[in-house]
Amino acid sequence: MINHNQRKRQFIDYILQKYHHVNPTVTYLLNFLKTQPNIINSVVFTENVKYTPRGIYISYQQNTQVPFVYYKDQLSYTLCEQAFHDIRLSTKFEQQKFYLEFNTPDYFQQLYHLDIFEENPFMPQDDELVLKTNAHLERLSIEATIKQLSKKLDGALDKHQFEQVSYYLKQIEQLRGELDEN
C-alpha cells in the first residue's frame, strides 16, 4: 500500500504527463516538489489558495490570463521563481506548508481518487458574511472617528478657535455622508 506522500507524487506525475505548461519553470518546480522528500511533506492540495499564507495556483487552461500565481502573505507574484526560491528556503529554515491548486478539468476527481485533497483551513466560511462584517467594522470605525472629532470640535469651540471648528465640522459632515451612503 502506498503512503500519502507517494500519492502526492503520483498526482504530480499525472499532471506532468498529461498537461504541458506554457512556462517551463513551472515544470521544474513540480519536478523539484516531487523529488524532494522533505518538501513533499509540506505540499497540500486544496482549493482557493489565494486565502492561504503560501499558495500556488497553476493553470493549464489555454485561455487563462495568468497561468501561474504565487500567493505569499496577502501578496501575489506571477513569477514561478519567487515560489521556487521560497520553497527551497523553507526546507532549510522553517518548514512552511505550501498549498497548491491546479486549474485542470479533472483536478478534484484525481485528488479524491488519490485521497490527497485537504480542506483549506484559511478559506472564509461565507463570502457574504465577510462582506457584511467588513461593512459593519467600517461603520464602527467611522462612528468612532466622528465621536473623536466631536470632542475636538467641542474643545475648539471652548477655546474660540473658529478655523479649527470649521475644519472639524467639514470632517464630521463628510464622514456622516459616508455613513448615509452605506
Image (spheres, rainbow, N blue to C red):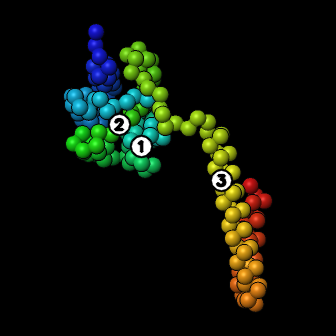
The residue lying at 39 percent from left, 21 percent from top is 116
Residue 49 found in image quarter: top left
Q: Is residue 11 left or right of residue 152?
A: left
Residue highlighted by disc 2? 97
Give the residue type at disc 1.
Answer: Pro
> Residue flagged by tag 2: what amino acid is it?
Lys
Of pointers 1 and 2, the one earlier in the residue sequence? 1
Helix or strand or loop: what does disc 2 sit on? loop
Badge 2 crowding class, 10 Å Cα cut-off, few under 14, some 14 to 19, many 20 or more, is some
- Do tag 1 and tag 2 residues touch (Cβ < 8 Å)? yes
Kindly report the distance in space between the C-alpha atoms of the residues bearing marks 1 and 2: 8 Å
Q: Element type at marker 3?
A: helix
Q: Is residue 31 visible?
A: no
Q: Is residue 38 visible?
A: yes
Q: Is 127 left, or right, of 11 in this rendering?
A: right
Residue 164 in the image, given as x and y percentages of width and height: 70, 84
For the C terminus, the quadrant is bottom right
The numbered dot on residue 137 is 3
